[in-house]
Image (tube, rainbow, N blue to C red):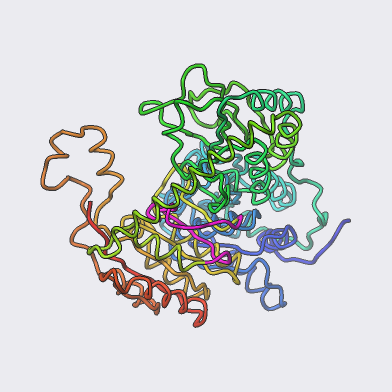
Amino acid sequence: MLKKVAIESAAEAYLELLASRGVEYFFGNAGTDFAPIIEAYAKRAAEGQLLPHAITAPHEITAIGMAHGYAMVTGRPQVVMVHVIVGTANALGGIINAARAHAPILVTAGRTPLTEDKLLGARNRHIHWAQESFDQGAMVREFVKWDYELRMGGQLETVVDRALAIARSEPQGPVYLTLPRETLSEKLDALEYFDPPRVGPPAASVADPTAVERAAEILAAGRNPIIIAKSSGRDPGAVAPLVALAEALGSPVYEQAATHLNFPQDHPLYGGGDPTPQLADANPIVVVEADAPWFPALRAPGPETTVIQIGHDPLFSRYPIRGFAVDLGLAGAPRLTLTALAAAVGRRVDPAAVEARRKRWEAEHRKLVEAWATRSAAVKGDAPIDMAWLSRCIGDAIDDDTIVVNEYDLDTSQTTLRAPGSYFSQSPASGLGWGLGAALGAKLAAPDKTVVCCVGDGAYIFGTPTAAHWAARAHNLPVLNVIFNNRVWNAVKRSVTSHAPQGWAARAASMAMSDLDPAPDYELIARASGHWAERVEDPTVLPEMVRQALRVVREDRRPALLNVICKKP
């Protein structure tokens, strides 16, 4: 139905539309371009209209991370606004992360005023000339699904609805809208719009039934089928259908570099995070929303292996190059496609063959669980602290009402995560600095959940911790941050030693551009923002320190941080 409200400006109309479309939060890192928005917020507050809630983020990485975290937990897009092209530049790493992680975000930026005089909102600061570019959207165009510049207030309903619908359509991702100050300042008397909107994302689709039946035939006849999943758990509703498929086949599921919880870790068919040892003997292989299911330069399936890929875009068409086999691609929502495939497989399989496979892989699962426990137990007394022991302490302390945000260092072989929507790891793009902000967004989205953010010390630095800690306190978001502090960018070090195992750098006493010594007292940074924070060096007190930190965030509702001094590789 049509709805009409009295307003004063295009900026006010914009906020009204966002609120009506279910946008609850407006994450802002403000500049001179925000003047009409802030004026509209003041008017709405005076009238008792609070949505969308304004969330101040003192750095763009924090703002985009919070929006990403909120979207990944709820599936609903929120809005970020940054300051013209310079704010866009600061946010770009987060936009790339969101693009590769398929996080729906409406990223907006002011635009340097178009005019030099006469119009309300025209240039009146020295920065307004130097901050203009010929094509502001060009900076982000490769990594957003759509970009546009608002031309006039009368376009707002069309533009906002189109932006949100495209962000939510699969594969989901960020969109980018620039907002000139004169346009936001445009005087309007009323806004008339449809509520609910007339434009929305397409309904979820299932893969072609004929292709699903063909996949079921291949799997039922397969000698040794395995499944590799990475991000199908982006839709929590896809977890149970993946379990159903694994059980129908009696086959293991491997979470290769998982970005989400795709399969319960305590399920007897859970194979862990490394399918590499099975690749030579597996046939067929089902790949579910995994951009890089193995590394061909190291080990790959044989040329005779049939590969079935399932996902919204099994070809990952936004990647310039990707040569993994797609002998049969099932394009559609994994939740629906896996459900259909599990049913089709169940009609075809030989129960005796399934039972034999199931017993084999359940025995393998028990061996893996025992080996994982043995590994952490063997290092529990080591000082500096071993990351496996730290991961085990966290895994033992959390429950199914915990959301884990992991930027690299938590070893998930030491956890027992099983609840859909309980685990999120960094985007495949791995733009460092995502975790701190994403954890805050997750807490905002799920205030009754415990949120634990695991970061390396390098990722912590990238995450603009002063801005993130300020936001946690200002917006009452009690998150536990755990720093796996090994005083090195170990990803860089591993890359160098893999490239040249016996090379000069591998044999050197120290490696250039990877060392992070001398390490700051990171706990003091958190304390400066009013957080409970402690440094932990003694492995024997670590379990209690983790439990104490969790009590602080759960019972005292206070942000907490543990700076855990780990082994330096």
Q: Nearer the viewer, residue 534 or 250?
A: 250
Residue extending furthest top? 304
Instruction: Give the extent of the magenta segment.
Output: 399-420
Q: Residue at x 36, y 73 (%)?
A: 526
Q: Is residue 392 magenta?
A: no
Total number of numbered labels? 0
Q: Residue at x 42, y 54 (%)?
A: 407
Residue 413 lies, in percent from the top left, at 43, 52
Is 567 displayed left or right of 309 in the figure?
Answer: left
Q: Height in image: 501 above or below 547?
A: above
Q: Height in image: 21 above or below 450?
A: above
Residue 310 lies, in percent from the top left, at 62, 33
Q: Height in image: 441 above or below 424?
A: below
Residue 469 lies, in percent from the top left, at 42, 70
Residue extending furthest right? 1
Is 100 displayed left or right of 277 in the figure?
Answer: right
Q: Nearer the viewer, residue 376 or 76?
A: 376
Residue extending furthest bottom? 556
Q: Nearer the viewer, residue 343 or 348?
A: 348
Q: Is residue 400 magenta?
A: yes
